[in-house]
Amino acid sequence: MADAIETETNYAGFIAVHVGAGLQSQARLPRYRETIKRACLQGIRALNNGKNASEAACMAVAVLEDCPLTNAGIGSNLTLDGNVECDASMMDEESYGAIGAVT
């Protein structure tokens, strides 16, 4: 991913994401990489446009949540009952918060 971020000439920070816990298909590796690249660049663009770190992180995660390949948002793995159940948290130097078991 370093080459993807180096294309942004004046980036203002660092963004790292992953496609979710669990087994990932090797056949989908190029699609995972493209999704990760889009998410990281979305976060970097947010920082370059004056957004704070929390806003940039949320914007990067939104890309992952909108992708059916990732274990987040619309691509979430199902519970034994066949439902999507998600957790989320956010923390910065001043505050923190979390939600859990949202269906």
Image: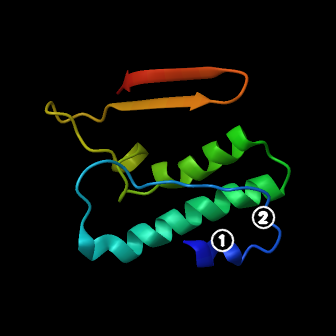
The answer for how far apart the CA atoms under marks 2 and 1 are is 8 Å
Quadrant where the C terminus is found in the figure: top left
Q: Position of residue 19 (x, y in %)?
A: 40, 55
Say what amino acid the circle numbered 2 marks.
Tyr
**Quadrant of the snapshot with the N terminus:** bottom right
Q: Is residue 72 above or below residue 1?
A: above
Q: Residues within 10 Å of mark 1 (few under 14, many from 20)?
A: some
Say what secondary structure mark 2 lies in.
loop
Q: Residues within 10 Å of mark 2 (few under 14, many from 20)?
A: some
When the figure is inspected, residue 38 is found, relative to residue 51, above or below; the finding is: below
Q: Can you tell which mark lies on residue 92?
A: none
- Residue furthest to the left in view is 80
CB contact under 8 Å: marks 2 and 1 = yes
Q: Secondary structure at mark 1?
A: helix
- Locate residue 54: give its quadrant: top right
Residue under the image location 79 percent in, 58 percent down = 12
Q: Mark 1 or mark 2, which is nearer the start of the sequence? A: 1
Residue that appears at 44% across and 54% down: 18
- The residue pinned by badge 2 equals 11
Which residue was labeled with disc 1? 5
Q: Quadrant of residue 101?
A: top left
Residue type at numbered disc 1:
Ile
Left or right of 46? Residue 18 is: left
